[in-house]
């Protein structure tokens, strides 16, 4: 389930320096379930199943602002940014059962499943809270009525979260994964938009993205 609320404020056009501001709020709940089975494997593992339950709740608040400064008739400098604040709670529980929907297998069988199939029944949960400010800067040159060039830099951000698929618990209990960290990206772009006559236009852009 996902709920979103957006707020946008655009000041009157009479302002000398155009300003755009807004806010964003999102709430989501993710609860997938799966029950892989080992029926294709021979012998001991034939009737075993590995059901799991995963849940992730998240709440995201975001606010952004952007301002453009036309410091000459041909040149415009735009600067802005976005602030995010996100909280997530996650949990994952896995079992080994005798068939789909069957009773749990004896704990004495767990070492064999861990060694041969890399499956360790477990239950883990965690929480994370992250905040980030992502800026952007854009310089635009209007060198003709229907032609312009621009140079921009922007930073992106993707928050961390929780892994639903790992078959093992995370360290120090084992070598599985559960919580993963955020990701940042810096993007640099140089481009142009040029009008050809009254009906045609050529757009070109070169960009480079660096991930952290």
Image: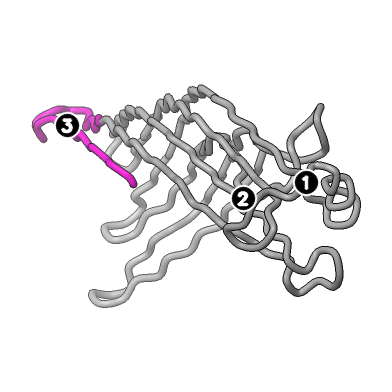
Residue at screen point 51% across, 22% down: 129
Residue 43: name its quadrant: bottom right
Query: What residue sits 21% from the left and 32% below the top?
Result: 18
Residue placed under numbered mark 2 in the picture: 208
Residue 3, above or below 128: below
Residue 210 falls in image quadrant? top right
- Residue 8 part of the magenta segment: yes
Q: Residue at x 78, y 46 (%)?
A: 106
What residue sits right under mark 3 in the picture?
9
State the SS at label 3.
strand
Which stretch is magenta?
Answer: 1-22
- Asked if residue 50 can be seen in this view, the reply is yes
Do the residues under discs 1 and 2 have CB atoms within 8 angstroms? no
Mark 1 Cα-neighbour bin, 10 Å: few <14, some 14–19, many ≥20: few
Q: Which residue is mark 1?
A: 106
Q: Is residue 55 magenta?
A: no
Q: CA distance from mark 3 to mark 1?
A: 61 Å
Direction from residue 49 to residue 18 in the image, left or right: left
Q: CA distance from mark 1 to mark 2?
A: 54 Å
Label 2 neighbour load within 10 Å: few <14, some 14-19, many 20+: few
């Amino acid at each position: 389930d996902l709920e979103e609320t957006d707020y946008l404020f655009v000041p009157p056009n009479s302002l000398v320096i155009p300003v755009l501001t807004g806010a964003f709020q999102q709430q989501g709940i993710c609860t997938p379930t799966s029950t892989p089975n080992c029926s294709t494997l021979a012998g001991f593992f034939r009737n075993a199943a590995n059901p799991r339950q995963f849940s992730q709740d998240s709440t995201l608040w975001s606010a952004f602002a952007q301002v453009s400064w036309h410091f000459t008739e041909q040149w415009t400098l735009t600067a802005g940014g976005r602030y995010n604040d996100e909280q997530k709670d996650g949990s994952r529980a896995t079992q080994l059962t005798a068939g789909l929907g069957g009773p749990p297998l004896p704990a004495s069988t767990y070492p064999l499943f861990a060694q041969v199939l890399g499956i360790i029944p477990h239950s883990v949960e965690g929480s994370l809270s992250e905040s980030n400010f992502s800026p952007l800067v854009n310089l635009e040159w209007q060198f003709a009525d229907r032609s312009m060039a621009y140079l921009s830099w922007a930073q992106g951000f993707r928050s961390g979260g929780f892994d639903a698929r790992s078959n093992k618990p995370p360290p120090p209990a084992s070598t599985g994964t559960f919580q993963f960290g955020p990701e940042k990206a810096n993007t640099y772009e140089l481009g142009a938009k040029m009008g050809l006559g009254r009906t045609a236009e050529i757009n070109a852009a070169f960009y480079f993205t660096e991930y952290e």
